[in-house]
Amino acid sequence: MLQVQRAIQCQPIDSSLQHEEKEKYAKFRCSSNMAEIFLQQRSKATWIKLGDDNTKYFFSVIKHRRLQHAITQLEDKHGVIQHEQEAIAAIMVDYYTELLGRKQIHRVRAFNSFLKAGRILDITKQFELIRPYTKKEVKQAMFSIDKNKSPGPDGYGSIFSKILGE
């Protein structure tokens, strides 16, 4: 194929050389494809042979990791080490209840003077905030986002929305 391509460079108009290059290229693609299929089959055979050997090792590694992350003992408030799962769970519940507090029925009321000291919107602005929005407004808001902003929780950036909206 290399020789034919060199000859074509010297005689670019020769149709017989162009036809010969096409045939050689097709033959090259076919042999390349066959070699790739052969290597895929060989790798599958190797995996089948060694895969079972690796399975036992793989599961032992996972079991070891689970044991490393498991809580098998915990010290309570009194300095006593607990080993039972129910006692460990109770220690954790007590710790987080103390940390976060208990649910209360009565809420603390906000100071009205504090709330009234800030700016208050007039009625027209309040209605503007609760009015329904249009598709045009949503599209305008989405297209105004810079394309270099980081993606949202779904993993898609604003450029994705812009491409879909066009």
Image (cartoon, helix red, strand yellow):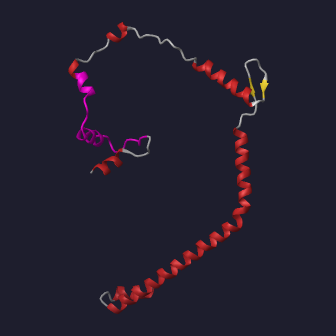
Quadrant in which the N terminus is drawn: bottom left
Residue located at (43% from left, 43% from top): 154
Point out the residue furthest to the front here: 105
Point out the residue furthest to the left here: 124
Residue 38 falls in which quadrant of the image?
A: bottom right
Would residue 125 appear left or right of 155 to someone viewing this image? Answer: left
Question: Looking at this view, is 139 or 102 the one in front?
Answer: 102
Point out the residue furthest to the top here: 113
Residue located at (23% from left, 22% from top): 125
Tell me residue 42's x, y (percent). Answer: 63, 73
* Vertical arrangement, residue 136 with respect to residue 29, above or below: above
Q: Is residue 129 magenta?
A: yes
Tell me residue 33's x, y (percent). Answer: 51, 77
Specify the segment rendered in magenta. 125-152
Point out the residue furthest to the bottom here: 16
* Vertical arrangement, residue 133 with respect to residue 81, above or below: below
Residue located at (41% from left, 11% from top): 110
Residue 50 falls in which quadrant of the image?
A: bottom right
Tell me residue 146's x, y (percent). Answer: 32, 42
* Vertical arrangement, residue 65 with respect to residue 46, above or below: above
Would residue 93 appear left or right of 137 to someone viewing this image? Answer: right
Question: Looking at this view, is 137 or 38 the one in front?
Answer: 137
* Vertical arrangement, residue 105 with respect to residue 147, above or below: above
Tell me residue 135's x, y (percent). Answer: 25, 41
Count every numbered label the image shows and give the total: 0
Q: Is residue 51 magenta?
A: no
